[in-house]
Image: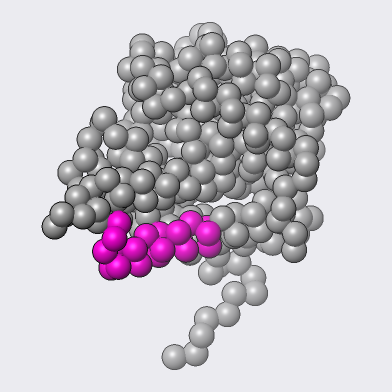
Amino acid sequence: MDFTFNDEQQQFADALRRYLDKSYGFEARQAIVRSESGVSDTHWAAFAELGLTALPVPEAQGGFNGGPIDMLVVMQELGRALVVEPYWATAVGIEALRLAGTGEGEDASLLERAAQGEIKLAVAFHEPHARYDLFDIGTTANGQGEQQTLSGTKSVVLHGAQAHAWIVPARLNGEIALFVVARDAAGVKVTDYRTIDGQRAATLEFSDTPARRLAGKHAGAAALEHIADYGTLLLCAEAIGALDALNLATVDYTKTRQQFGQPIARFQALQHRMVEMLIHAEQARSITYLAAMRYSSEDADERRRAVSAAKVRVGQAARFVGQQAVQLHGGMGVTNEVAAAHLFKRLAIIETTLGDVDHHLARFAALPGFVTAEA
């Protein structure tokens, strides 16, 4: 298989990297994290101007119809720079509208506005009691046709408070359906908070909150799982960028940290450790690229298998590289003044978002065609 980016993808990545290197340095990022909203409207507008917000949107709604590989290119760069703006949340929301919506009327309007960078979106995957089970849903819908009301609680909705609209899974007559809820809808309480990696999340409490049911052909449990796989794939791609940045930061730091009168980078044992870190990152990269190529497979099990395999390997790499980087940085590796600490925390969150290593190992093993080795 050829995993080389085409010229257009590489040019897009180069343009985004130039912008981030120039305008989204570590200190600038920290200032955004400390701000009241936790995001920057200025950078969001720049992302829209660069075409990031339009990339995943279908052409019919003013987008570029970017596929998984195109999005992988973007997410790697955002991961490298530790971007905290809600691009991942909005991209996953766009995919939810694309998969479960009709592409017309209000669905089309949301996609068009998202493409222009006018609105941000978020998908409320989880509930307080459900851990990683997407289908353990207690939120209920009542009403007729597309117009419904929702009651229930969604937890750890990434960038929930920054979104203008949410895509919310709920039970309608016992079956899973997907709904769009406006940020300013009546009967909703939003509790915003900062996560350990500098991102934002929210708890959403609905009480007879007006909602509109997504009425596409595929708007039930299968669509919800498909959307979660998309989000997982993008997280893996973001992790690749963060792993690259953390490996580079670690190598650079070991060239300056002195022990026994010389840089610790000269010690063979530590050189071997950094090579292991690089190997972990490269294996995670390869399997993530493979998952991106198989995401659009007509065989849903092939998609599930590839995405879960990628999340497992990325999770293992995130833990190994993160922990080793902290050890090689010494005490500096856990201080807020050093980017390595923030890369470590971001990787820790990615590892546990939409299913940790154990969850995806179990999911992979439960798929058809998996055969255990004989004892």
What colouring style does the render use? one colour
Residue numbers of the magenta segment: 265-284
Q: How many marks?
A: 0
89 is higher (above) or lower (below) than 344 = above
Nearest to the observer: residue 320 or residue 270: 270
Query: Dividing the picture into quarters, in which one does residue 335 lie?
Result: top left
Q: Is residue 55 left or right of residue 282?
A: right
Name the outermost residue toward the bottom: 375
Specify the quadrant that holds the N terminus. bottom right
Name the outermost residue toward the left: 260
Q: Residue at x 36, y 17 (%)?
A: 31
Q: Is residue 283 magenta?
A: yes
Q: Residue at x 80, y 17 (%)?
A: 105
Spot occupied by residue 38 in the image (x, y as percentages of width and height)? 40, 18
Nearest to the observer: residue 1 or residue 89: 1
Query: Dividing the picture into quarters, in which one does residue 164 lie?
Result: top right
35 is higher (above) or lower (below) than 263 = above
Q: Residue at x 29, y 50 (%)?
A: 254
Name the outermost residue toward the right: 60
Query: Dividing the picture into quarters, in which one does residue 75 lie?
Result: top right
Q: Is residue 120 magenta?
A: no
Nearest to the observer: residue 71 or residue 294: 71
Q: Residue at x 30, y 39 (%)?
A: 341
291 is higher (above) or lower (below) than 124 = below
Q: Is residue 34 shown to the viewer in this render?
A: yes
